[in-house]
């Protein structure tokens, strides 16, 4: 029996929409789908949302300068993740790596051009993008990146161990199931003899 669509909406996990907003946006998206007879283009959604009275209007950034800057930042992310640089080793092996690597660094910060409190400069963590070429000459950043990569690797290995444990339990459950099925078959065969 097929399922029935409801008018209950929620936010998809990991998106910038809250479930409360999803309950507002959902019916409007369905209205737009009906208006365009199910053939909705992204541009149609933008056109509908441009009306200040639209329930989805607040989802969009309507400040042209700010929206353009956000788009350019997204394009920069795509660009920096689209190009690799070759690294040639003495044995002739060529390996390609990302041009940039994100590194968390401590930076000195002046807030509102204030002088440091108690003569101490305030610092904060900030992500910057550096080239592997620069990393090869900056020992501190190289160590930071290596430390980050090792921590990430350990997290992945811990997750792998958990998955292996789950897999082992599934394999054991499968073996127990096969044994139980075999015993039931044997019991049926015995009953058939009586």
Image (cartoon, grey):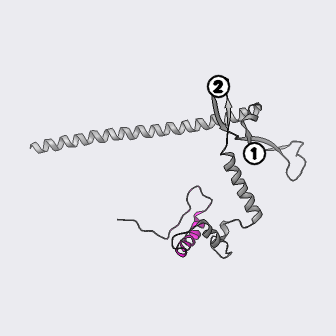
Q: Is residue 102 magenta?
A: no
In this view, 22 is above or below 157? below
Other-residue count near label 1 (Cα within 10 Å), few / some / many at <14 / 14–19 / ≥20? few
Q: Residue at x 87, y 53 (%)?
A: 112
Which quadrant of the figure contains the N terminus? bottom left
Q: Is residue 88 above or below residue 75?
A: above
Q: Residue furthest top?
A: 91
x and y, in percent, of residue 161 in the image? 50, 36
Q: Position of residue 18 (x, y in %)?
A: 60, 62
| Residue 17, image x, y percentages | 61, 62
Quadrant of residue 69 in the image? bottom right
Labels 1, 2: front one:
2
- Real-space Cα distance between discs 1 and 2? 37 Å
Position of 193 with respect to 61 (left or right) is left
Q: Is 33 inside the magenta-drawn segment?
A: yes
Tag 1 secondary structure:
strand
Task: Please identify the quadrant where the C terminus is shown.
Answer: top left
Circles 1, 2 touching at the beta carbon (< 8 Å):
no
- Secondary structure at numbered mark 2: loop
In the image, 8 versus 122, the foreground residue is 8
Q: Residues within 10 Å of mark 2 (few under 14, many from 20)?
A: few
**Residue 65 or 185: which is nearer the viewer?**
65
Q: Which residue is mark 1?
A: 126
Query: Which quarter of the picture shows residue 121?
Result: top right
The residue indicated by pointer 2 is 92
Image coords of residue 103 (percent x, y): 71, 40
For residue 133, side relative to residue 151 (left or right): right
- Identify which residue is drawn at 64% across, 74% down: 54
Q: Which residues are magenta?
A: 7-36
């Amino acid at each position: 029996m097929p399922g029935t669509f409801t008018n209950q909406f929620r936010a998809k996990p990991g998106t910038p929409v809250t479930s409360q907003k999803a309950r507002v946006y959902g019916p409007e998206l369905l209205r737009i789908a009906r208006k365009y007879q199910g053939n909705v283009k992204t541009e149609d959604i933008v056109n509908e949302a441009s009306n200040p009275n639209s329930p989805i209007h607040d989802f969009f950034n309507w400040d042209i300068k700010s929206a353009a800057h956000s788009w350019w930042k997204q394009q920069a992310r795509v660009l920096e993740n689209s190009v690799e640089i070759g690294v040639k080793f003495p044995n002739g092996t060529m390996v390609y790596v990302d041009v940039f690597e994100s590194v968390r660094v401590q930076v000195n910060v002046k807030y509102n051009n204030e002088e440091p409190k108690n003569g101490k400069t305030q610092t904060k963590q900030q992500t910057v993008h550096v080239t592997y070429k620069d990393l090869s000459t900056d020992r501190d950043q190289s160590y930071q990146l290596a430390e980050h990569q090792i921590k990430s690797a350990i997290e992945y290995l811990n997750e792998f161990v958990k998955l292996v444990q789950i897999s082992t339990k599934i394999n054991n459950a499968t073996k127990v199931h096969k044994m139980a099925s075999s015993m039931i078959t044997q019991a049926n065969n015995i009953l058939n003899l009586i």
